[in-house]
Image (cartoon, rainbow, N blue to C red):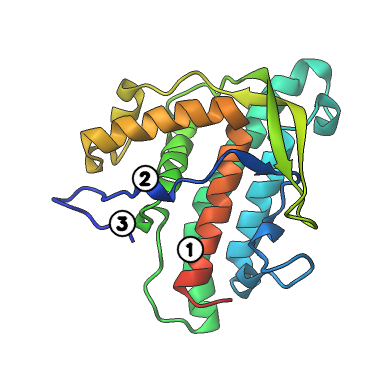
Amino acid sequence: MAKKVGKRFDLNFSLLPDLRVAPLCMTIDWLSPGYGAKNPLTELPETYDRADAAVKFCWFVGGPAERLCCKEDDTMTTRQAFLRAALSEFASMEEALKRDLVSIGIKDRCMKITDSRNPLLHIVKQLRNLEIHLRSGAISSQRQRALLQNLKKPESVSEQNLTIWVMDDLTTEQFDNLRGAHLYRENDRNELISWFNQAQKAWGLDEIVFRAVLSFGQELIERYSLA
């Protein structure tokens, strides 16, 4: 868990995901111990539903225009709406977890996203605050060549050309205006921002949010011994 050192978060940047290879398909089933096996997060049914919804919204964000099922003039605003929805569902996993723990009789403390020492979870939680409160949500596309991994055959990796969606670089000024920004040490804040700006240009916003959902889900599975 992220300890607060001098009332500030103690992050571990070695926990950031390896973004050299991305999953071929966006699905919450990457949390399962094997293809076709039960997903341990289903033991927390409402939390699972929120995570699953966030992943599905990410799938729409990064998909082709025809996937959005809207008028051509509305594709950008629709894509932005799905991004906000994905971020909101990710953040709502915390509230859902509270109810799930009571429902299944687990008396352990409810884990918050920012309890994690993984910087990925912190930057995506702050990205949610940024998108909801400060920005218009404008995103743009670019082409990227990427290595993708198959869920059924994890050893199988293929190279493909992708269209990814990114936002303008996050700045220190924007971050410092967010609620809770004072809880991050200056060096950590700068590293968070730098990593995010580089990672989104490599994989797109949808992949970054997707990875955060999986990371938080995995931490919950381990924290509450669900596997």
Q: Position of residue 188 (x, y in %)?
A: 28, 38
Give the quarter of the image for residue 119: top left
Tell which circle, 3 or 1, labels the residue nearer the N-terminal end. 3
In depth, the one of 61 and 16 nearer the eye is 16
Q: Residues within 10 Å of mark 2 (few under 14, many from 20)?
A: some
Tell which circle, 2 or 1, labels the residue nearer the N-terminal end. 2
Height in image: 46 above or below 50?
Answer: below
Amino acid on which the number 1 mark rests in the picture: Glu
Where is mark 2, residue-wise? 13
Q: What SS does tag 3 mark?
A: loop
Q: Which residue appears at 59% of the width and 71% of the height?
A: 44
User: How far separated are the C-alphas under marks 3 and 1?
Assistant: 12 Å
Q: Position of residue 79 (x, y in %)?
A: 69, 28
Tell which circle, 2 or 3, labels the residue nearer the N-terminal end. 3
Report if residue 185 is visible in the image. Answer: yes
Q: Which residue appears at 55% of the width and 44% of the height?
A: 88
Mark sitting on residue 219: 1
In depth, the one of 208 and 136 nearer the eye is 208
Give the quarter of the image for residue 3: bottom left
Amino acid on which the number 3 mark rests in the picture: Ala
Q: Which residue appears at 42% of the width and 51% of the height?
A: 15
User: How far separated are the C-alphas under marks 2 and 3?
Assistant: 12 Å
Q: Position of residue 99 (x, y in %)?
A: 51, 70
Q: Position of residue 219 (x, y in %)?
A: 48, 63
Q: Residues within 10 Å of mark 1 (few under 14, many from 20)?
A: some
Where is mark 3, residue-wise? 2
Height in image: 130 above or below 183?
Answer: above
